[in-house]
Image: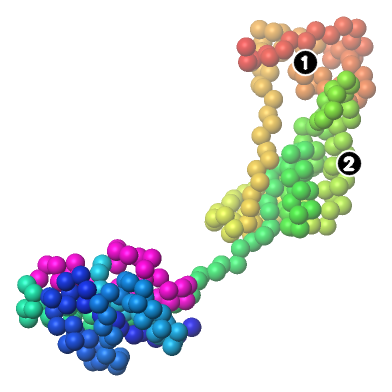
Amino acid sequence: MDLKPRAYVCSGCGIGEAVDVAKLAKAPVAFGLAEAKVHPFLCGPEGRALISSGVADGFNLPVVAACSKRALVENFMFGPNVVVERVNIREGVAWVSEPKSDDAQSLAEDYLKMGVVKAQKTSFPEPFIKELSKTVLVVGGGIAGMTAALAVARAGRNVVLVEKEERLGGYLQKLKKRFPFSGEADAPVETGVSETVNAVMNEPRITVHAPAVVASISGQPGLFEVVISAGGTNIALRAGTVIQATGLKPYDPEKLGHLGYGKSPNVVTNAQFEEMAAKGKIVRPSDGGRARSVVFIQCAGSR
């Protein structure tokens, strides 16, 4: 849309007593504009109607020589497609200059001329719209990462899922059962990890890289440049969002020597115990025999 300026001069608030507004109104003529329209109160209903009438005639860039642009801001708003150039001849000229002096007149005319030229060089800005990536990168193929990937895919977005191990499932695949997520916890239930893995692998919007790691991420939200390292090959892609779903790391059992870990092979971590349970048999690592009694030490390392 082209902008077409028209000048207006306010004679109120002492401006008419400080400068010759009739002479001032002729200043825009030197720049190809019509003589400015003079009104005693441009901020009032009649003054605003005068400017609105000009806008309706296609003059969508009013150059208003009146009070400071900090004053009566809402009074000089005429719609989203109208640009208003405010020229301060009240505080900047009338209230600080000797009334009817040559300096006051020249100053007011110079201000108005500058406002007119600025208006003539004004144009609507063209928005910079960057094409953003809608692909979501999920780092970590455990239950959290897989659940996030499925939710994103079902929302209609493409997903790239990166897992450092050969198989998806993360820590949960080492467990035999888990507590229910809802309802009464009267008995453990199956982990459901296999079903989740199958759902991920059969989802056309999800691309799985495993085993693989994220070699680098640069850029910004919406425009992340990602390099995935998989089997000695680097894969470059762009992602708009990154979901970090890594982090489960058991406590280092080497620090639990005072509890017998490392001294007796039959002292194991809960993770090792869960792996035994997943295989269906609790045995003594020392000789492979069946364990007849089990002692649990809770909160090892945190108390």
Write down the residue under mark 1: 268
- The part of the chain drawn in magenta is 69-97
- Percent position of residue 90, x then y: 20, 70
Residue type pointed to by label 1? Val
**Mark closest to the chain's N terminus, 1 or 2:** 2
Q: Which residue is drawn at 66% across and 21% down?
A: 252
| Image point (20%, 70%), residue name | 13
Residue type of the residue flagged with mark 2: Glu
Name the residue furthest front: 46
Q: Is residue 116 visible?
A: no
As for residue 73 lying within the magenta part, the answer is yes
- What is the quadrant of residue 285 in the picture? top right
Say above or below: 43 vs 142.
below
Tag nearer the camera, 1 or 2: 2
Give residue 105's position: percent from left, percent from top.
Answer: 12, 80
- Residue identifier under label 2: 195
Q: Which of 298 and 276 is in front in this view?
A: 298
**In what quadrant of the picture does the C terminus appear?**
top right
Residue at (64% x, 15% y) in the render: 301
Disc assigned to residue 40? none
Tell me which corner region of the image, top left, top right, bottom left or bottom right, holds residue 82.
bottom left
Residue 5 visible in the shown view: yes
Q: Quadrant of residue 89?
A: bottom left
Please determine whether, in this image, residue 197 is positioned above or below residue 14: above
Q: How far apart are marks 1 and 2 (CA)?
A: 29 Å
Q: Residue at x 32, y 71 (%)?
A: 43
Assess whether residue 39 is covered by the magenta stretch: no
Nearer to the camera, 109 or 229: 109
Compared across the picture, whether 175 is left or right of 238 comes to: right
Q: Do the residues labelled 1 and 2 touch (CB within 8 Å)?
A: no
